[in-house]
Amino acid sequence: MSALNTSEVQLFLLVGIPGLEYAHVWVSIPICLVYLVAVTGNSTILFIIKTEPSLHEPMYYFLAMLAVSDLGLSFASLPTMLRIFLFNVMEISPDACFAQEFFIHGFTLMESSVLLVMSADRFLAIHYPLRYTSLLTSRRAARLGLSFAIRSLLLVLPFPFTLRRLKYCQKNLLSHSYCLHQDAMKLACSDNKINVLYGFFVALCTMLDLALIVLSYALILKTVLSLASLAERLKALHTCVSHICAVLIFYVPIITLAAMHRFAKHKSPLVVILIGDIFLLLPPLMNPIVYCVKTRQIREKVLGRLFNIRRR
């Protein structure tokens, strides 16, 4: 740690909400509630899937992986956000910043990978309904999920090391209440071309996941339109509603934030901060709600457990 090339800048500064510094304590209340609901919701899904033998199927294993990704995003961003809004502590050491951005980007890529695998799962279930259970066994689903998780962590592993080799001379103000790779590398006063190129490569991998998800749904739509009756079409599409919502909840904020960082010349700092917070807070909050509302098996098991607890 002593070899860190930050002879001039010893601390980075995170930001809360510009212009509302006096109300940070009040802002922390809804943020804490969001985190509480997100952690409770995703933990409940993991508990239900683990304890219910009827849910030990590939589709629900992938949902469990999505919940793990959401929990990882929540816990990775929680420390700095609460420090800022509860205690007005903006400073963060470079090492802590680089560690945080590794976990945030790692779990972001993991969630992107899981959403891709879930889209492939929906395609197999709709296109090959009779062969689905033989094509995608629980063991294959576990191996597939594990391989994509390892791929996600390996892709972002160079991030903290490439950031540590940079020199940070004068600028130390970041753009969010947590650390991102593209945000930290802009503060460097040394050559950051490697960071720019590798960051662009990782972003392309995320966009490739999205492109493959779109391709999967194009094939799903083609299969659904070939079904004879309208009822069969609607039933097939209904199984995809939860996943489509999860894809939109995840990708719309991240694409918007990336586009603003790269292309917006006169972007409002407040808008960037709000979109950045939505990018981290919204998926962990909404995914459990969407899957509990739209997936009958999950909803029934959750409600069944709640009513049993009340009766006791």
Image: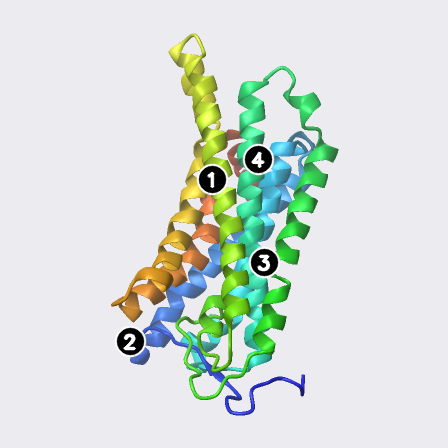
Disc 1 marks a residue whose amino acid type is: Ala
Between label 1 and label 2, give the one nearer the viewer: 1
Mark 3 vs 4, N-terminal side? 3
Disc 2 marks a residue whose amino acid type is: Leu
Residue 272 position in % (x across, y down):
33, 65
Task: Find residue 234 and report its image quarter.
Answer: top left
Crowdedness near tag 2: few (<14), some (14–19) or many (≥20) residues, C-alpha within 10 Å: few
Quarter of the image that includes the C terminus: top right
> What residue is drawn where x is 55% and y is 53%?
109
Mark 2 vs 3, N-terminal side? 2
Element type where label 1 sits in the image: helix
Residue 250 position in % (x across, y down):
44, 48
Between label 1 and label 4, give the one nearer the viewer: 1
Spatial distance from mark 1 to mark 2, Cα to Cα? 39 Å
The residue that label 1 is drawn on is: 211
The residue that label 3 is drawn on is: 106
- 21 with respect to 109 (left or right): left
The residue that label 2 is drawn on is: 20
- Above or below residue 79? Residue 171 is below
Q: Are marks 3 and 4 in contact (CB under 8 Å)?
A: no
Quarter of the image that includes the N terminus: bottom right
Q: Are marks 4 and 2 in contact (CB under 8 Å)?
A: no
Q: Are marks 1 and 3 in contact (CB under 8 Å)?
A: no
Element type where label 2 sits in the image: loop
Disc 4 marks a residue whose amino acid type is: Lys
Between label 2 and label 3, give the one nearer the viewer: 3
Between label 3 and label 4, give the one nearer the viewer: 3
Between label 4 and label 2, give the one nearer the viewer: 2
Circle on res. 301: 4
